[in-house]
Image (cartoon, grey):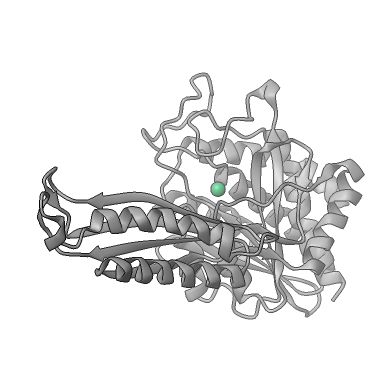
Amino acid sequence: MEIKKLIEKYEGEMIACRQDLHMHPELSFEEFETTEKIIAVLKDLGIEYRKTEPTGVIADIKGGSDGPIVALRADMDALSVNELNENLSYKSKNEGKMHACGHDSHVSMLLCAAKVLNDIKDTLKGTVRLIFQPAEETAGGAKAQVEQGAMENVDNIFGMHIWSNIPTGKISCLVGSSFAAADFFTVDFKGKGGHGSMPQQCIDTAVMASSFVMNVQSIVSREISPLKSAVVTIGKMEVGSRFNVIAENAKLEGTSRTFEYETRDKVEDSIRKFAQYTATMYGGKANVDYTRATPPVINDKESALLAQKIIKESFGEDSLIFEEPTTGGEDFSYFLEKSKNGGAFALVGCGNPEKQTNAAHHNGKFNVDDDALKYGVELYVKYAKEYLDKQ
Ligand code: NI
């Protein structure tokens, strides 16, 4: 049976699965029930699987002939958000928790893809690895699964995110960067406290910290090429204790976003340099703690073009769109970094104003248009099959 027909056959089960997961959301690394539900389906299909710790599942569908391994990834966690969709028959039953980013749809699409791929496994020229990833929202899940061998021998990986900002039926897959590296940092300034009336005897970290905040603005405008992009945000400042006491300590916290490894290095170096020089200028000291969190998601050309070809052939020329890269982070990048031959990540539209499924992600009114799921599954299945075919 052709792939579209198989998807049609399983579509009802997929939607029911999505709505069930939506009703029972679980937070990052607490996806125990979700893990069990995934395992139940895989067991039923006779697909080999193993659990990862503490949650998550990895399964292999071995094809009719030997060949490379292509991985498909779906994240599984929900958010601490109160669901505000009052009239939804499948509204969250877990108070204060909600699938407000659509990861319920990712799991159900990948499970449906598992059914279809299992049906056509004799035609696969290699292995399809299914990665059900926990804790994307806290950016710890992909890393944990990589450490547990998720990417061992994987040649290429494909992932997707349902996207409410894109209409149902449209899909975006870019060549190059699509999600930014999301890093964070703290800067501790040390000065010398004293009476607010006698600044000449002190080293004022309030002035130092303020000056630093103004100075770092020029990293993006003066240090980075105008053809590249970056964000440097200081989100928190803690300085001083009283109106007439000169502050001895200041602590600043911020985040930076960059789309390329080179820009990321440059931004980190500049933040360190600006902190040191600013402190030195005022006679104080600075200590910078810079944490490289999620790497950027960079789709290699060949993989992205394969996804684009499938989108156009399967859903029509107009269905392929090019959504701007987002400054948000996506820990799919940890898998990409470990893939032998790269991979790609797509955004699958699920926005439909008539069904009120165009609310922002992470909003209490977020919801997924179930009609969007069939597009995602077809892309998952065909990406895996065609990647193996062309090797
Ligand atoms: Ni998400």
* Residue 75 location, quadrant: bottom right
Query: On the image, which quarter does residue 374 sit in?
Result: top right
- Can residue 31 be seen by looking at this rendering? no
Q: Is residue 342 left or right of residue 194?
A: right
**Which is more toward the observer, 199 or 286?**
199
Q: Position of residue 329 (x, y in %)?
A: 54, 55
Q: Quadrant of the C terminus?
A: bottom right
Q: Quadrant of residue 259?
A: bottom right
Task: Describe residue 362's horizontal placement relative to residue 54 as left or right.
Answer: right
Q: Give percent across and percent down for residue 267.
A: 52, 67
Q: Position of residue 350 (x, y in %)?
A: 69, 37
Q: Residue placed at 81% from the left, 68% from the top?
A: 302
- Nearer the observer, 127 or 276: 276
Q: Residue furthest top?
A: 87
Relative to 270, residue 167 above or below: above
Residue that appears at 45% across and 37% down: 98
In the depicted structure, whether residue 81 falls above or below residue 133: above
For the point 25% across and 69% down, which residue is it? 283
Measured as percent of width and height from the top left, residue 87 is found at 52, 19
In the figure, is residue 48 to the left or right of 208? right
Choose between 19 and 375: the one closer to the eye. 375
Q: In this rendering, would 37 be left or right of 124?
A: left
Answer above or below: position of 170 versus 240.
above
- Asked whether residue 354 appears in the rendered view, the answer is yes
